[in-house]
Image (cartoon, helix red, strand yellow):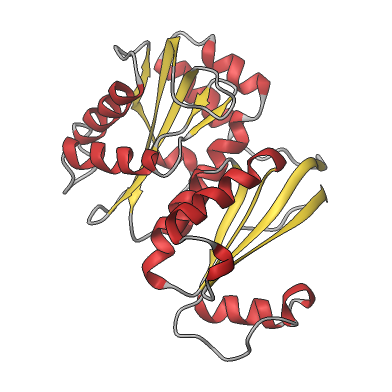
């Protein structure tokens, strides 16, 4: 599902009656539950899921942006909406500044790949000053919808320099920790993120020179690999949030993280 397909123009609200983080999450939960597009999830269930995600680490990414999001068991559809506050709201953002732009994502627990893809698409758009300024100066939900639709189109032929970016690989062999770790990783401001599943992750590791020398060739019952690209300054906080869930990585033998520099990206591949 594309970002535009999941976006509901009826869930775009300018100047909502909210004054703090809790009210933002409650407003989102109420909007989603009454939209008619999400079944089997009450407002309280959605609010609890959003709050639980925030407890893992704030979704306030800085530059006046926060992206509340959650995955819920038993629902079938993704739903994206947007709140625009005319006054900044303290959202515990990484830069300490208040947030005004609140895109949100609610989706099925069973579709982590699509979930990460949508979060990544939103994150990429919000990096553009032109996009943020256009959103903040808009006067109607319909205008905002058209702006998002226009900015969601790929820009062909433009080489992407990525100064100050890192590529993270998170290797997981503990099934009970996977969902929580995925939530932490989805919450970081990624330009791209994906999950490689069991046999694919084993093949990837065994055939990649960087990892082949220290990866056990014995196939494990559960293998997952999360790959994402994030800014230098949030690498430490991402690792810290992972250790908050699983404890010290130096004391585990079922989780491994590698960090590599990403200097330049050019070209594209079909989805």
| In-image side of 263 versus 168 (left or right) | right
Q: Is residue 175 above or below residue 27?
A: below
Residue found at x 46% / y 57%: 181
Q: Dividing the picture into quarters, in which one does residue 189 lie?
A: top right
Is residue 114 in view? no
Q: Residue furthest bottom?
A: 218
Q: Is residue 198 above or below residue 249?
A: below
Measured as percent of width and height from the top left, residue 271 is found at: 61, 58
Q: Is residue 252 above or below residue 245?
A: below
**For this rendering, which residue is in front, 29 or 82?**
29
How many tags in the picture?
A: 0
Is residue 182 in view? yes
Measured as percent of width and height from the top left, residue 121 is found at: 56, 41
Residue found at x 49% / y 19%: 99
Measured as percent of width and height from the top left, residue 263 is found at: 84, 49
Q: Dividing the picture into quarters, in which one does residue 205 lie?
A: bottom right
Residue found at x 79% / y 53%: 261
Q: In this view, does 254 lie above or below 22?
A: below
**For this rendering, which residue is in front, 160 or 52?**
52
| In-image side of 58 versus 96 (left or right) | left
Measured as percent of width and height from the top left, residue 29 is found at: 25, 32
**For this rendering, which residue is in front, 216 or 194?**
216
């Amino acid at each position: 599902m594309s970002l535009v397909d999941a976006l509901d123009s009826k869930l775009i609200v300018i100047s909502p009656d909210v004054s703090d983080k809790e009210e933002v999450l409650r407003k989102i939960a109420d909007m989603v539950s009454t939209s008619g597009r999400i079944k089997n999830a009450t407002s309280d269930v959605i609010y609890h899921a959003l709050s639980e995600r925030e407890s893992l680490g704030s979704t306030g990414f800085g530059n006046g942006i926060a992206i509340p999001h959650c995955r819920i068991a038993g629902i079938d559809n993704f739903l994206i909406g947007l709140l625009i506050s005319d006054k900044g709201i303290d959202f515990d953002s990484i830069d300490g500044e208040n947030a005004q732009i609140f895109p949100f994502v609610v989706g099925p627990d069973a579709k982590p790949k699509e979930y990460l893809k949508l979060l990544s698409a939103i994150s990429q758009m919000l990096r553009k000053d032109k996009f943020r300024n256009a959103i903040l100066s808009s006067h109607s939900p319909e205008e905002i919808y058209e702006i998002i639709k226009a900015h969601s189109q790929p820009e062909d032929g433009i080489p992407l320099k990525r100064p100050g970016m890192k590529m993270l690989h998170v290797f997981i062999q503990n099934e009970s920790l996977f969902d929580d770790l995925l939530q932490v990783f989805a919450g970081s401001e990624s330009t791209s993120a994906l999950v490689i599943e069991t046999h694919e992750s084993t093949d990837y590791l065994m055939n990649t020179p960087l990892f082949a020398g220290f990866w056990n060739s014995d196939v494990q019952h559960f293998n997952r690999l999360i790959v994402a690209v994030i800014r230098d300054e949030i690498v430490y906080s991402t690792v810290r949030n992972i250790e908050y869930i699983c404890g010290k990585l130096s004391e585990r033998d079922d989780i491994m993280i590698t960090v590599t520099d990403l200097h330049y990206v050019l070209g594209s591949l079909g989805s």
